[in-house]
Image (cartoon, rainbow, N blue to C red):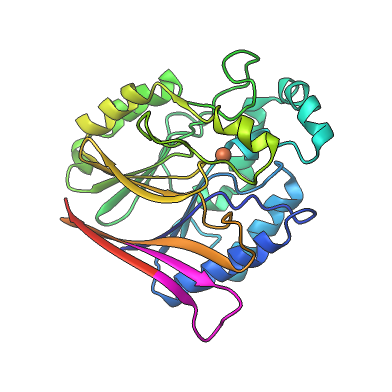
Amino acid sequence: MRIAHISDLHLNSRLKPENIHKTRKLIEYALDNGAEHLVITGDISDNSDEKDFNVFKEILKQYDLLRSDKATIIIGNHDIFGGPQTAQDVLNFPSKCMNINYHAKVAGFVKYFKELFENTTRPHEELFFPFLKEFKNILIVGINSIAEYSRFKNPFASNGHVSKIQRQYLDTVLNRNEFKDKVKIILAHHHFYPKNITSHSSEDTLWSKIENYTMKLRGKKKLMKIFKNNNVKLVLHGHSHEMKEYIREDIRFINAGASLDNNSDHLASLFLIDVFPKLITTELCSVLLNKPDNPIEEKLIQSVAI
Ligand SMILES: [Fe+2]
């Protein structure tokens, strides 16, 4: 199956209208190049605004992708807490976050995009993550890596944490016999970088500099152990704004966090991932938006046998 992976759309029709255009162009490129399934690993909206969720829903509808078998999304920190939109907002952001009902936001997100969560398996009707989506040779597992707000542990609402209940569910469900022969792909918002790699937030602002230091996923080791014990082959994520592929403990990680956010109004990127039972091939494709006759600026192809 050919999967197109994009992330961190940060749709904001008021302040970032170019992101809507870029998203459309990436989807068109993916479909023109044979993508059978679209994955978006969080931060669909910039400010958790229902208007922007609606823009995205309309885009999906336009390309007949508002279907569980055609597209999978997970939630990002901006889909729950949003982000400061002005300098003044930076000061008010912590108190805004404290007043956000985290669980209601997660439930609202899943209900808003309910068509994409049809035919999935999850721990309980009131627990939306992790969810499992089965395809012929593939199992896609979406997790919620967004930590709840805490003045001390998560002061900028950018850190990650996967709850114990999610980890326990993952550990029991992933080793079911029925999934034995499927290629297991995890979707998370946060990265799994080793300590020596730094993450990148959006825009070169004071806020982004603060955010860069607070993008960590707590409890990474426990998750890695679960992935390893259950033969997970691939993890797709975003959050850190760069296009990067890396391997940790024989698990392949793909970060599509800079699909749109790349300091250019005319460039957008995605990963095309071909998943076969014994092989995963990835292509990093960049699309130049103002040159329709020559859309591919860069195409990097890597194959790794699994
Ligand atoms: Fe994020």
The x, y position of residue 37, in whole percent, is: 42, 61
121 and 306: which is toward the camera: 306
Ligand 1 is located in which of the four quadrants? top right
Residue at left 24%, top 55%?
Answer: 137
Residue 107 visible, this angle = no
The x, y position of residue 144, in whole percent, is: 49, 33
8 and 172: which is toward the camera: 8
Figure quadrant of the N terminus: bottom left
Question: Is 297 contained in the magenta span?
Answer: yes
Residue 19 visible, this angle = yes
Q: Is 155 positioned to the left or the right of 73 in the image? A: right
225 and 112: which is toward the camera: 225
The x, y position of residue 58, in whole percent, is: 67, 62
Q: How many numbered marks have been drawn onto this rendered protein structure?
A: 0
Q: Is 246 positioned to the left or the right of 188 in the image? A: left
Q: Which residue lies furthest to the top in this view?
A: 152
Residue at left 45%, top 35%?
Answer: 198
Residue at left 64%, top 26%?
Answer: 156
The x, y position of residue 157, in whole percent, is: 62, 27
Residue at left 40%, top 68%?
Answer: 35
Give the magenta part as a residue range.
283-298
Question: Is 7 contained in the magenta span?
Answer: no
Task: Please tell me whether residue 297 is drawn above or below residue 112 in the rendered image.
Answer: below
Q: To which quarter of the image does residue 121 belong?
A: top left
Q: To which quarter of the image does residue 152 belong?
A: top right
Task: Please tell me whether residue 84 is drawn above or below residue 273 in the rendered image.
Answer: above
